[in-house]
Amino acid sequence: MSKQWHWEPTVGYFPGMHVADAMADLADKGFVHVDQVAYVIAGHVDPFDEEQLYWSNTDGWVSYPDADVFSKDERMSLNLPIEGRWEEVAEDSERVVRAACQQCAVREQVTVPADRHDKYLQGGLIQEVFPEYSAQQREVLMNALPPWRVDRPFSYFLCTDCWHDMGAE
């Protein structure tokens, strides 16, 4: 039987934890979501890639998966950074998974259903969980950047261009 929780963490448990890490930590302990009351701080949009940025106490403005999670009490007591605004953490039905090319550092991404991605992260075979995805899309999933990284030996990702360049040599 699963434990139930109302996500209202105490100071010292979640501050500094990233969104994905905090949710995974609770899931690993057998907790299920009942009444999620958690927040992230949204800020300005990155001018280079037009990505919405979120606050991390250790890293400043970051992508959503790297954002810190705050409790309801912290929301009421903490001051926001400049340009910051509170947003409730929503349950994710889709995830954007990114991988960085080891040759040129270009990032490729794939958007996947969260429930199927969880199945893969829990040990499902990628070709069975995502049969309709191309080989390159599966490579992105298998060589994902944190927080979706799955440790595996010989992990090495090449973007589509570098893959073709390597084959031409």
Image: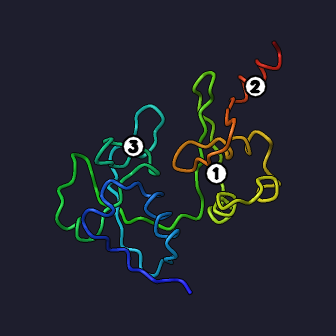
Whole-number angstrom distance, CA of label 1 to CA of label 2: 21 Å
Taking the spot 67% from the left edge, 37% from the top edge, the residue there is 155
Q: Are marks 3 and 1 in contact (CB under 8 Å)?
A: no
Find residue 160 and report its image quarter. top right
Taking the spot 34% from the left edge, 52% from the top edge, the residue there is 42
Residue 163 is marked as 2
Find residue 63 and report its image quarter. top left
Q: Taking 53 as reference, is 131 above or below it?
A: below
Q: Is residue 115 left or right of residue 16?
A: right
Q: Position of residue 58 (x, y in %)?
A: 30, 44
User: Which amino acid is tagged 1?
Assistant: Thr
Q: Taking 67 as reference, is 47 above or below it?
A: above
Residue that label 1 marks: 111
Q: Nearer the viewer, mark 1 or mark 2?
A: 2
Whole-number angstrom distance, CA of label 3 to CA of label 2: 29 Å
Taking the spot 34% from the left edge, 42% from the top edge, the residue there is 61
Q: Position of residue 117 (x, y in %)?
A: 66, 59
Could you tell which of marks 3 and 2 lies nearer the N-terminus?
3
Residue that label 3 marks: 62
Q: Taking 51 as reference, is 5 above or below it?
A: below
